[in-house]
Image: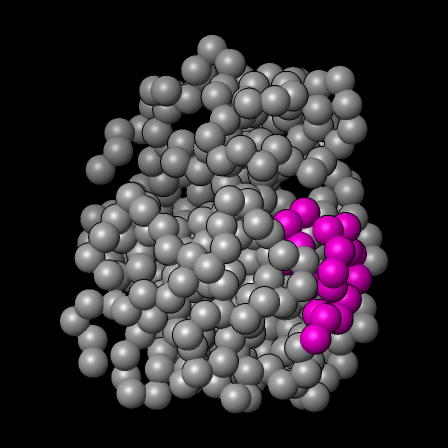
Amino acid sequence: MAQRKTLTEEQITLLRWIGDGCPDGVMEGYSHRISAPALRTRGLVGISGRGPTWKAEITQTGRAYLKQADGPNPPVPRQANVSVTQQLVDDVIAAGGSGELGNNSDNNSPTPVQVTGISTAIQVSAGGYHTCALLSDHTVRCWGAGGSGELGDGTYDDSSVPVQATGISNAIAISTGRNHTCALLSGGTVKCWGYNYYGQLGDGTYGSDSDSSTPVLVSGITSAIAIDAGNSHTCALLFDHTVRCWGYNYYGQLGNNSTTNSSTSVQVSSITSATAIAAGGSHTCALLSNKTVKCWGYNGDGELGDGATDDNDSPIAVQVSGISSATAISAGGSHTCVLLSGGSVRCWGDSEYGQLGDGAYDNHSSTPVSVVGLP
């Protein structure tokens, strides 16, 4: 277990930026989202990479966002490896701290612990530093980090025990992003809450002061049958088998042939027969009725599965190679897997930690590979 260390105000500010201001996980290996009174003061932390200098600005209300030191606001730099001035996080490992385990404690645990007060859950979804459960009475309980309102209880406070999302009484599915949460309601509409700098809530608002600690209605969605949230974007599968997405779009993960963020839902181009969707960190995939798969968005590690890499992102859906009998799909941060009709599984994308299951690691594959040991 990591040992807790005392953090300086500057380190806390930096860690807050990593958690809130960088949807694609730059420096994710060091990140841990922390809420602290120190964030109520204004400050700048310099971030230098292979290109411009970037700064994390903390507003007077404690919201964080990224901007160039001498240039415009986001999008964020594409580089996944960013050095931090003075190496502020070299010795920082934040253990626990936001109540992510939901057991009325902020301590890590190497073994499973019981989440307090949850006995009728029918679905669970884990975000960046928070988790939500859909209960059998169609209400939603969330716990963990709440500094952006992602718990939905009307506060911006962390909670180590589940709290009820305000005004949700007819949810049939939930999905959590990095710092936001969405619920599919029984009438086919969607409500979201939490961090909203890039329009993740889908209600037409965006910016550093547009977070919401209570659920808001996503514009233009009236017939959704499934939802899935990526890091900072969300997509909905509609009854007519089309797909609509909203939020962060720097890599084209909204699929509307654009790289402009959208605070309202936009239709994914050329998808008319989807039966399931999967939103990854900055890419999205759809399982089609003919059991093939199409993906769009970030492709730096082969996330789109079409054989192309080298930052060959696509804002429109491309065909995943060699998949013709898929029956289910799921996406991770930088990889995707499908279950095939014969019971085998194939995956593609980043495999730095062996995510693809093919016996290799510290690698990636831009085409599907078979998971070892399955039919």
Left or right: where 257 falls relative to 112: right
Q: In the displayed structure, does residue 120 sit left or right of residue 49? A: left
In front of the other: 235 or 118: 235
The residue lying toward the viewer, choosing from 276 and 38, is 276
What is the x, y in percent for residue 158?
Answer: 52, 45
Tell me the quarter of the picture where residue 154 sits. bottom right
Q: Residue at x 29, y 44 (%)?
A: 362
Q: Please tell me how many numbered marks the rendered image carries.
A: 0
Q: Is residue 251 magenta?
A: yes
In the image, is 98 to the left or to the right of 343? right
In the depicted structure, whether residue 174 falls above or below residue 137: above
Residue drawn where x is 76% and y is 81% of the image: 222
Q: Which image quadrant: the N terminus?
A: top left
- Give the colour scheme shown: one colour
Q: Residue at x 36, y 78 (%)?
A: 339
Q: Is residue 154 at least partly visible in the picture?
A: no
Q: Residue furthest top?
A: 86
Residue 171 higher or lower than 342, as above or below: above
Q: How far from the left and from the top, in percent, is residue 225?
A: 62, 83
Which one is in front, 83 or 318? 318
Q: Is residue 234 visible?
A: yes
Q: Nearer the viewer, residue 268 or 145?
A: 268
Q: Position of residue 36 (x, y in %)?
A: 54, 30
Give residue 340's position: percent from left, percent from top. 35, 82
Q: Residue furthest left?
A: 373
Magenta region, main secondary structure: loop
Q: Which residues are magenta?
A: 250-270
**Residue shown at the point (71%, 28%) measured from the top left:** 67
**Residue 137 belongs to magenta span:** no
